[in-house]
Amino acid sequence: MAESRNIVRVSGVTKTFQLGKVEVKALTGVDLEIAAGCYLSIMGPSGSGKSTLFNMIGGLDKPTSGRVFIDEVDIAQLDAYELAWLRCRKIGYIFQTFNIIQVMTALENVTLPMIFGGMNNDEAIEKGIQLLELVGLGDRYLHKPNELSGGQQQRVAVARALANDPAIILADEPTGNLDLKTGEEIIALLKQLSRERNVTVISATHDFKMLNVSDQVVWIRDGRVDKIENRDELSISLGDIGTKE
Amino acid sequence: MVDDGSVANEGARSEAPPNRLLVLPIKKSVEIALKSIRVRFFRSLITTISLVLAVSFLSFVNVTTDVANGLLAKEDPGLRRVLIRSGYDIAPEENSVGSSPKLRWIIILSLMVCVVGIVNAHLMAGTERFREIGTMKCLGALDRFILKLFLLEAGMQGLAGAGAGALLGALFSLFNSFIRFGNVALTALSWADVGQSVLFAILVGFILSLVGVMYPAIVAARMQPVEAMRTEE
Ligand SMILES: Nc1ncnc2c1ncn2[C@@H]1O[C@H](COP(=O)(O)OP(=O)(O)OP(=O)(O)O)[C@@H](O)[C@H]1O
Ligand SMILES: [Mg+2]
């Protein structure tokens, strides 16, 4: 499976932020190939450039140089409409801060991407309820975000990310604002989804719990890839942290 | 749907329409716009209040002119004298009055102040909503979806605010005229003119509300998702 095909390819990507006269080099040349169906974690200390890389892969920001290919299409070549379509149908995003739209109920949050994608309302509602059941919130779909706990909000975000059956789920520190147990539940959920639906999960994190479930871990340091480890190598280098599952 | 009810499907990707459709149906956008007005009701109210005041002033002035014209149309020298005494400049041969240039200036100024207020209120509300806009863009919203939501919201606010303001101004003007001139002010009045003045005030308010939201809406719609999401509340 891991050898099947690359769904994401990052080639020589750099990103420099201009802060007045100061240049901040967030990424200094990243090359990465991500196989379809892989559960990949991007690990690294704070400020190493994980979120920046996440934004590049997700088409949320443009690299200073280098290219990002999704399904072998260079996303820099896409116009605004195609990019929006990519965000709508190909990629599901999960954020550390959940980013649930506060004025809408859980169900409306989940159905919104389907509506954008042209699905009619009844179908969207039916599928939205199924997705919320899948993430364990079957009885909560009429709740507003502020009536849900952090973990529940993140579950809504997971359901929303799945709305249009994306090929890729991008998660930027999905467990960063959750306690240990809730974080584990979200990780287990993501792992289950990646296995059952063959979704490629790419998650930036410094949560070591993520290592247990990852097929591949990319270690980032100072804006470049430090090392890439596959699952089998991982258990060796980390001793018993990576062995159980 | 290709599959019967099961969500877990790989085939969904091939199901994508060939023309890569992205839509925000009008029914859904009205729903979202109404919802965000309701949730941010207090803020919407503040945004709208300057509009209500400016529009009610406009409506007040125009309806008062309608009353004066109604009285003049009676061609009663007594009423003409009363009008002149209450401040109208009416030349002997004239049979109608308009609002004075000075008054018109004040109206225009008040409307301009009101637009500036609306722009400002929307820009402030925009900061609050950047995260929401960024999120919507991550879910596939096009710039024009955001534009549409802002315009709809402002349009509805504009209609409601201008409607309330125009009626308020008209009622106050009628009440005021009744006190000043007595019953004849209302009986001599052409109600069609009053209706026209009220509708005109509503239209002006509606347009001002849309004009006021234009710039903030364009700023919000053009925002890149990352910029929008980075703003912390
Ligand atoms: N918009 C920006 N403007 C200027 N500098 C930025 C911007 N975004 C990120 N940076 C800088 O780029 C570097 C990498 O940031 P990034 O957010 O990618 O780190 P990270 O690995 O996600 O960290 P964390 O684990 O704390 O989330 C940091 O030095 C940061 O200050
Ligand atoms: Mg980060």
Image: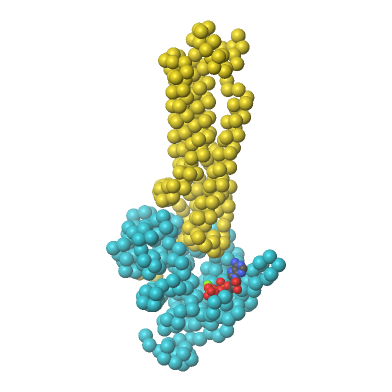
Chain colours: A cyan, B yellow
- Asked whether the viewer can see residue A65, the reply is no
The part of the image, by quadrant, that contains residue A158 is bottom left
Closest to the observer, A159 or A145: A145
Residue at figure coordinates x 28%, y 63% from the top left = A139
Above or below for A23 versus A84: below
The x and y percentages for residue A94 are: 45, 68
Residue A81 in the figure: left or right of residue A184: right
Residues B53 and B128: in front is B53
Image position, residue A60 (x, y; %): 55, 65
Name the image quarter holding residue B211. top right
What residue sits 32% from the left and 58% below the top? A142
Q: Position of residue A125 (x, y in %)?
A: 34, 57
Location of the N terminus of chain B (image quadrant):
bottom left
Q: How many marks?
A: 0
Residue in the picture at 42% in, 58% down: A102
Q: Quadrant of residue A65?
A: bottom right
Relative to residue B165, is residue B190 depicted above or below?
above
Q: Residue furthest right?
A: A21
Is any part of residue A89 visible from this angle? yes
User: In the current view of this chain or complex, which residue is farthest to the left?
Assistant: A139
> Which residue is nearer to you in this view: B75 or A240?
B75
Q: Give the percent coordinates (x, y) of residue A38.
A: 45, 78
Which residue is depicted at the point 44% across and 23% down?
A: B175
Q: Residue B146, relative to residue B164: is it above or below?
A: below
